[in-house]
Image: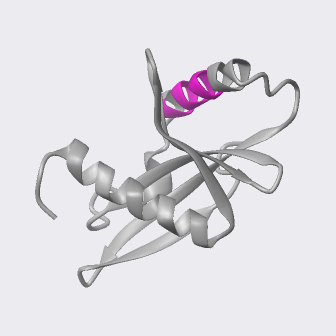
Amino acid sequence: MFGNTRSVGKIYEELAANYLKTQGYKVIAKNYQIRGGEIDIVAKEGNDLVFVEVKARYNDSFGQAIESITPWKIQALLKTARFYVQKINWGDKPYRFDLVAIDLVEGKPEIKLIKNVIV
């Protein structure tokens, strides 16, 4: 796929959102941003609030998608999620972080969902 990083990212995030819907998730928001952080998809699975990071890989030269969740990225996700749960008055109810990893295999996207990626 060609284009700038943001437009390519939007394509993969849309693909991930559609995939999540087939898995029973209800997408609430996409690209939720605050200063210093962004969450690709906010969703609910049943009563669970889920923050979803989307990572796409064209090949494995930069490692697997889960390896791209660095300590800095974890801190930014946590900060953004805390802001979001305060904003919606989620209270002390639990929430979790999932990863949708999209790998291009022979030109076709292969999608993997990894739940509770940050513990």
Name the residue at the top extreme.
Answer: 35
- Give the mark count: 0
- The residue lying at 51 percent from left, 47 percent from top is 53
Q: Which residues are magenta?
A: 73-81
Residue 63 seen in the current view:
no
- Give the image quarter of residue 104: bottom left
Q: Where the N terminus falls, by quadrant? A: bottom left
Magenta segment's dominant SS is helix
- At which x and y percent is residue 84? 64, 25
- Residue 106: image quadrant is bottom left
Q: Residue at x 23, y 80 (%)?
A: 107
Q: Is residue 58 above or below residue 41?
A: below
Tell me where residue 114 appears, x and y as whole percent: 62, 61
Q: Is residue 29 left or right of residue 61?
A: right
Residue 57, x across and y down, in percent: 32, 62
Q: For this rendering, which residue is in front, 79 or 27?
A: 27
Residue 39 pos. (x, y %): 50, 36
Residue 36, above or below 16: above
Please indicate whether residue 116 sits to the left or right of residue 66 in the image: right
Farthest bottom residue?
A: 106
Does the segment drawn in magenta span residue 93? no
Residue 62 appearing in the image: yes
Quadrant location, the C terminus: top right
In the image, residue 79 lies in the stretch drawn in magenta? yes
> Please, is residue 10 above or below residue 93 in the view?
below
Q: Is residue 74 left or right of residue 119?
A: left
What residue appears at the point 46 percent right and 61 percent down from the top-left corner? 16
Colouring of the image: one colour
